[in-house]
Amino acid sequence: MKTMPLRPLASALLLAGVSSPAFAVLGLNLSVDIRSLTMGNAVTADPPGISAIHFNPAGLTKLKGLQTDVQGIVANFDIQKELSVPAGYNVFGYSDDPLVCNDRADNPSNLCTSFKDKVRADVEYPSLFVPFVNKIVDLGEGWPVLAPTGGVSYNPPGSKLTFATAAYAPLVAGFGSENGNPGNYMGQQVAIERITYLSPSIAYQVNDQLSIGASIGMSYQAIAMKTDLRFPNEMIGVLRMIDENICAPFKGNNDEFLNMVLFGLCNAKEGMNPFSKFGQMEVQMTQSLSPSFNLGLMWEPTEDFGFGLVYQSPAKMKLKGKYVVRNALSPRELAAGMNSAVSGQFLAKLLEFPGGIPAVESGLVSMDLEYPEHIQAGIKYKILPDLQINVDVGWTDYKAWNTFEFKFDRNITALQIAKLLSSNVTNNSLKLPLGMQSPWNWGIGLEYSATDRLKFRVGYEPRTSAIPDDKRNTLIPINNAQLFGLGIGYRFDEDTDIDLSVGFLRSRDNIPACTSSMANACGIDNLLLNPYAGLNVKTNTKVTILGLNYRTRW
């Protein structure tokens, strides 16, 4: 019983924390450069124009004179989620979960007599977090996410130095759903973005074969979320049993003996239910300046072969923002009931419980977050005079997200209870273990020069998930993914190029009942985040990206 008040706040913060790595795994390099998408992001040895600032700043030495680069990237996120009931589904003997049960609300049975075959919990529209306004904005059903970027470079005549800067978005993603969507228990509105608004860069051509470069990225980082909360846990099933089977005949009688034995639980005006909505949470955290740097090397010993290497530094941040948790009536009544009886008051004082749970709990929150470092190397090779192949291998240190720690500007009543259960909790801080992995990934791209003006590109990049199997979730439904790209490049004249590209990322996942501690774990120890406990979960994510790039030399 003492675990109940912990969950709304702790689970809310876990949702906010896990959204960042999940989105980053999904959206890495999807909104930086469209030509790179068509080459499976295998461009370290052949970086694309001014976007070399991100992929390999040494490649800026290829740009002569004064050049500008403008592109528009449009992305559509199609995220489908499906819930289903396995054989023997129940939470402490109760199976009348309204998410999956067809029975009427006035059905007196605790067991569902007719389950829904499949329950759709699809994302309904994209969402974005608007900087400075600090608000999530829904774009409406069918509207895509737009990420315009641009940059400029300058190589003085006869100089071996090239200078550049660009504004681009390493990560922009978000989604939302209407009230009542079954998927709202893992994010009704979610938005995360990292926008590099200034990136002063320099590249130096050591000789005809070797170039080096460096760039500094000044970025804005934001995480925002609104989510419903529920906790189908065995302990809450016990509380429902007590309320419906033991307390029901004595409701309103204020029986002294019963109050003493059950610590005042029967005085609650509304009982606990493992399938009920426990509240709603909103949280937003931002950092206006998050610096990082990139170092690059490019070696081209022959016209047919080249090698590239880039190191992208970690960016250590301290995100700050606000949270609001609106607690439902039942957990507040549970605390009030305990404090209405002498035995309940004694138990609360013995365990250092707070005197009650407020209807609304709000304040300031901060989180130390490290945007992970990344290393990538690749080659380009002309297997035919008109056909070039690029192959890259990269590693990202997602293990930096092994644990998230939230710190508050005040003591939180929920954490006063939680600290009795975990060494990761104090009165004003909370550590959340995520257990992320640091996988290696690779990509391949082909570029065919049909004429001196026209080029065709195709790329493929399989992405290994950084999320362990026992941590998979529907907040951003991704396990392993595949990225496909197609593109056309056309040179109007010696100073002007245009590229048209399309990319497609897909990821399907199957999370059998009771297999993930961040989605559907069963039992009495699924304390933090399992809104679909005991249910099968399937996801199907599709991201379609269209882009147009215009480059010219002045």
Image: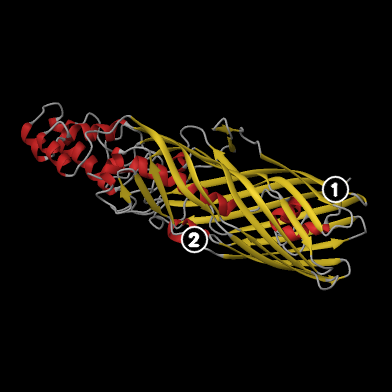
Mark 1 or 2, closer to the camera: 1
The N terminus, quarter of image: top left
Residue at x 18%, y 40% (from the top left corner)? 242
Three-letter code for the amino acid on which mark 1 is drawn? Leu
Residue 328 seen in this snapshot: yes
Residue on which disc 1 sits: 66
Q: How many dots with numbers?
A: 2
> Which residue is found at the position 14% from the left and 36% from the top?
345
Does residue 449 appear to the left or right of 484 in the view shown?
right
Residue 474: image location, x then y, percent: 48, 49
Residue that carries the numbered disc 2 in the rendered image? 399
SS at badge 1:
strand
Name the residue type under label 2: Lys
**Relative to 383, residue 238 above or below:** above
**Image location of residue 210, percent across then percent down:** 78, 68
Q: Is residue 173 left or right of residue 318?
A: right
Q: In this orientation, does residue 100 appear? A: no
Is disc 1 in contact with disc 2, using a CB cutoff of under 8 Å?
no
Question: Does residue 359 appear left or right of residue 124 in this picture?
Answer: left
In this view of the protein, which residue sits in the foreground, 240 or 104?
240
* Mark 1 crowdedness (10 Å alpha carbons): few <14, some 14-19, many ≥20: some
Q: Quadrant of residue 521?
A: bottom left
Q: Residues within 10 Å of mark 2 (few under 14, many from 20)?
A: some
Q: Considering only order in the chain, which callout, 2 or 1, is on the residue closer to the N terminus?
A: 1
| Place of residue 399 in the rendered image (x, y in percent of width and height, measured from the top left) | 49, 61
Q: Is residue 386 above or below residue 495?
A: below
Please name whichever residue, 469 or 368, is drawn nearer the observer in this view of the structure. 368
